[in-house]
Amino acid sequence: RIEVAEIDDVMARGEGGLLGVAVDVEFEENRFIYVAYNINIDGPEVRGTRFELSEDLVLDNALHIVEGLPAIESGRHSGTQLAMDQEGILWIGTGDSATANTPQDPESLGGKILRVTRDGEPAEGNLEAPFDPRIFSYGHRNTQGLILFAEPVDGVYGYSAEHGSWIDDEVNVLVQGNFGWDPLPPYNEDVPMTDLDKFPDAIEAVWSSGERTIAVSGLTQLIGEQWGDFDGALVLGVQKDQHLRVLRIAEGAVVGETLLYE
């Protein structure tokens, strides 16, 4: 293990700290690395920063491409996972900062999936006004993982993994729309993760944990013949029971689920 750098001013508290890292798809040419983290200077926030990694493994030329993502002092529901697609668009899955109005607020960047350029400008194809132009989807609770396909499949760009409240950790498709989380004041966590009564057109999860959350943590996809029957499967880290959960998905539905323990 080689320590490359310490990120200045990171506020490590509760669920907050150094949150997400992504390497640019053109790293060999531009040496860009993207990092998301909690910070508290004029108040708590989550920030996304682009660095250049020098040949001698030093992070330089910091550019804060997304600032002011909502956060609270405790760090709860900081979320903020990063992934870059083949077109050089940075995807950012944010947490709702345990604040009631953020997931459905079209101007708040909390409880959302964002898409921005390398410089933090809105990517083409996001939601239209009244939404902040960086927002791709909304109604999320606390994103803990993102994977992107090499190219969209039937309009789906990939998957996200999301912490539930007391029920329903979720795996969701990456498409535009409302995913139905709306814990209106005073942050009511007894509402459904996908509230179809309030939002009949909300997008339902591909997979959910059900009556007991398992605390999903991280998401990847297995690609290649070496994985046998698991080729193309999704793998979730699980904190509560400390295992890997392998999900095989076909035609938008889970067709196989395997638990791997140490």
Image (cartoon, rainbow, N blue to C red):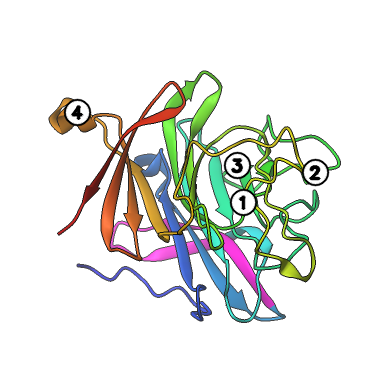
User: CA separation, marks 2 and 3?
Assistant: 17 Å
Q: What range is drawn magenta here?
A: 44-63
Residue 55 or 198: which is nearer the viewer?
198
Left or right, residue 175 beside residue 52: right
Q: Which residue is mark 3?
A: 117
Residue visible at 80% across and 34% down in the picture: 128
Q: Of marks 1 and 3, which one's residue comes earlier in the chain?
A: 3
Q: Quadrant of the C terminus?
A: bottom left
Which callout, 4 or 3, points at the residue further toward the start of the chain?
Answer: 3
Residue that label 1 marks? 193
The residue labelled by disc 2 is 131
User: Which numbered disc, 4 or 3, marks the residue closer to the eye?
Assistant: 4
Q: Which quarter of the rendering shows the N terminus?
A: bottom left
x then y, percent, for residue 59: 41, 64
Residues tagged 4 and 3 counted as in contact (Cβ below 8 A): no
Q: Is residue 46 magenta?
A: yes
Q: Which residue is mark 4?
A: 229
In space, the residues marked 2 and 4 are separated at their CA atoms by 41 Å
Residue reaching furthest to the front: 211
Asked whether the beta carbons under mark 1 and mark 2 sit within 8 Å of each other, the answer is no
How far from the left and from the top, in percent, is residue 122?
Answer: 69, 41
In this image, 165 relative to 3: left or right?
right
Q: Position of residue 202 (x, y in %)?
A: 69, 37
Q: Amino acid at mark 4?
A: Asp
Mark 1 or mark 2: name the one nearer the start of the chain.
Answer: 2
